[in-house]
């Protein structure tokens, strides 16, 4: 006997709260969470440097995480001290 299971489900309503918009970037600390993909860190570092040059953003704090895993508690703690954080995937 073969049993078939339907893996589909209704999407769950998740209340997502966006961070408040920054009034400006002058002196703001920029976090980067690099997911370890080949170009992710390079791309986000270029964006962060452009924010420094164009808008006077402050220090850049870069942390890495495994490609298929969550960031470490230490990485999250360091990034929590930033005013904004760039997170993404770039192959």
Image: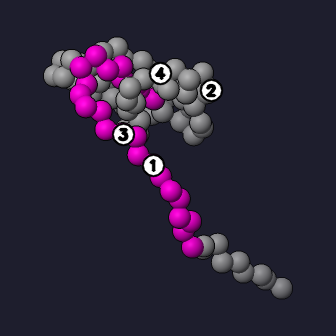
Tell me which label, 1 or 2, sits earlier in the chain. 1
Badge number at residue 2: none
Q: Which element type, helix, strand or loop, lies under badge 2?
A: helix
In screen coordinates, is 66 left or right of 86? right
Residue 28 occupies quadrant: top left
The magenta stretch spans residue 15: yes
Q: Which element type, helix, strand or loop, lies under badge 1?
A: loop
In the rendered structure, which segment of residues is drawn in magenta?
10-33
Q: CA distance from mark 4 to mark 2?
A: 13 Å
Rendered residue at 52%/20% (across/down): 78
Q: Nearer the viewer, mark 4 or mark 2?
A: 4
Camera sees residue 65: yes
Front residue (pair 45, 83): 83
Crowding at label 1, few (<14), some or many (≥20) Cα neighbours within 10 Å?
A: few
Badge number at residue 81: 4
Q: Which element type, helix, strand or loop, lies under badge 3?
A: loop
Residue holding disc 3: 20
Residue holding disc 1: 17
Q: CA distance from mark 2 to mark 3?
A: 23 Å
Crowding at label 3, few (<14), some or many (≥20) Cα neighbours within 10 Å?
A: few
Rendered location of residue 37, percent (x, y): 45, 34
Rendered residue at 48%/25% (across/down): 79
Rendered location of residue 32, percent (x, y): 41, 26
Residue holding disc 2: 73
In screen coordinates, is 79 left or right of 10? left
Quadrant that contains the N terminus: bottom right
Q: Nearer the viewer, mark 2 or mark 3?
A: 3
């Amino acid at each position: 006997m073969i049993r078939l299971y339907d893996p589909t489900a209704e999407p769950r309503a998740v209340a997502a709260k966006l961070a408040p918009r920054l009034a400006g970037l002058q002196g703001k600390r920029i976090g980067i969470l690099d997911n370890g993909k080949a170009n992710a860190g390079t791309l986000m570092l270029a964006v962060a440097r452009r924010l420094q040059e164009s808008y006077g953003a402050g220090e850049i704090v870069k942390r890495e995480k495994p490609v298929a895993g969550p960031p470490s508690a230490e990485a999250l703690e360091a990034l929590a001290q930033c005013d904004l954080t760039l997170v993404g995937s770039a192959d």
